[in-house]
Image (cartoon, helix red, strand yellow):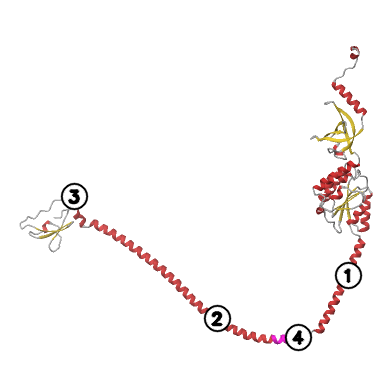
Amino acid sequence: MSDAAFSNLPEFSVTELSAALKRTVEDQFALVRVRGEISGLKFHSSGHVYFDLKDDKAVLNAVIWRGTVPRLRIRPEAGMEVILTGKLSTYAGTSRYQIIVEQVELAGLGALMALLEERRKKLAAEGLFESARKKKLPFLPEVIGVVTSPTGAVIRDIMHRLEARFPRRVLLWPVAVQGDKAPSEIAAAIAGFNAFRPKPDLIIVARGGGSVEDLMAFNDEAVVRAAAASLIPLISAVGHETDTTLIDFAADVRAPTPTAAAELAVPVRTELLAQTLDLERRALRCFSKGMEDRRRHLAQLVRVLPRAESLFAAPRQRLDTASDKLQHGLTRTLKIHDVRFNKAGSRLRDRMLKDRLAICGERTAALGERATRAEKNRLAQARRRLEGLGRELELISYRSVLERGFALVRAEDGTVRRRAASVKPGEALTLTFADGDAHAQTGEGAEKPKPAKKKLGSDQGSLF
């Protein structure tokens, strides 16, 4: 091809070409259904869902926008074989085409049953289907809560059967039993009845028959968990007798049909009345027969009983004898107790005297000890005082003067010569020193010593 031919081709930018391809693909494949297996499933934080749909030869990118996810009948799972309904589009950022999913369906009944079986095993492993968790139905509930469609034949069948058997008060919680909103509404209804004050005595979750796809709302995990968590006994009545849903395993009782659920909920009133009347008649017959048997037995006892006089004669005589013995016994007992009382009184007096003597002895001993301690204290005080006085006497005694070199002059008659003028010539004197006595005699013509003059400023006198 010549260069001129190339130059005549229109020129596109990348964005323009991508937009043209996008319009072409979306116009050509505005609505398609594609079958394949889900892989690379990713739930983005934005709420969008991204995955790949593949078969053995090709892979197709798929995306489910956040607003479409709540409307899906089936939640995508990795490895699930599905049929996607949506439109093809392109993503210019990576030059790839993808399907914008509007609906997800399981590819065939086998895949659906495999999904349900896997879900059943998962919930069973959590213990939601254990028989130990199931509650006993009340014998005659006052209020029955029914979760079903308000416009279907199910509620009419239940009301008709209750009316025929035993009329009860019924609370209807209207829900969708099929479609995208059904699972959330059914789960909310079960939880709502459990939150009632006062609560209904029984809950019936009911729906008429249908295909497996029609009953999928009752296989939803949220519905099964709500039924298992219900504190109120719950009867599952979904579909016909051959239909089985996962809520049947979690319910306390499964009813084959909604009509059968009403029959399980209440007894037949006429039968109950007949049974009650029969029990009343049987009770009356038993009571009458028992009374007759006791009356006959009493009459037989009356015939064999002795006369009242003979029956009470021996006891009366024993009573008289016991009365006499009692009188003598009282007198004798009083004497015995009087003697014991006197003995106890004398022992008590002796003991009190001994106790008082012991107390007096203790007090006397205590006083003696106090007197002894007081005498010792007084003697010690007197001794200390005497010693003090002795020390004072020693201080003022003439002996202390003798120790300083003075002598005591006494005449033969023992009188003390304090003045030289009182000493006679030739008189024998006794001189007492600190270490003993010495004898002396005055001279014959000795001149009497003149008294010494006192020195000014001194008041110490002379012994001679």
Q: Which of 424 and 191 is in front in this view?
A: 191
**Looking at this rendering, what residue extends furthest in the front direction?**
56
Span of residues in magenta = 307-318
What amino acid is labelled 4 in the image? Answer: Leu
Q: Determine whether, in the image, residue 383 is placed left or right of residue 117.
A: left
Quick check: marks 4 and 1 in contact, CB under 8 Å? no
The relative height of residue 429 versus residue 242 in the rendered view (above or below) is below
Q: Determine whether, in the image, residue 368 is placed left or right of residue 273.
A: left
SS for dot 2: helix
Q: Determine whether, in the image, residue 375 is placed left or right of residue 278.
A: left
Mark with earlier residue (4, 3): 4
Residue topped by disc 4: 311
| Residue at the spot 10% in from the left edge and 60% down from the top edge | 428
Residue topped by disc 3: 458
The residues bearing labels 4 and 3 have C-alpha atoms spaced at a distance of 139 Å
- Give the percent coordinates (x, y) of residue 310: 76, 87
The residues bearing labels 1 and 2 have C-alpha atoms spaced at a distance of 71 Å
The residues bearing labels 2 and 3 have C-alpha atoms spaced at a distance of 100 Å
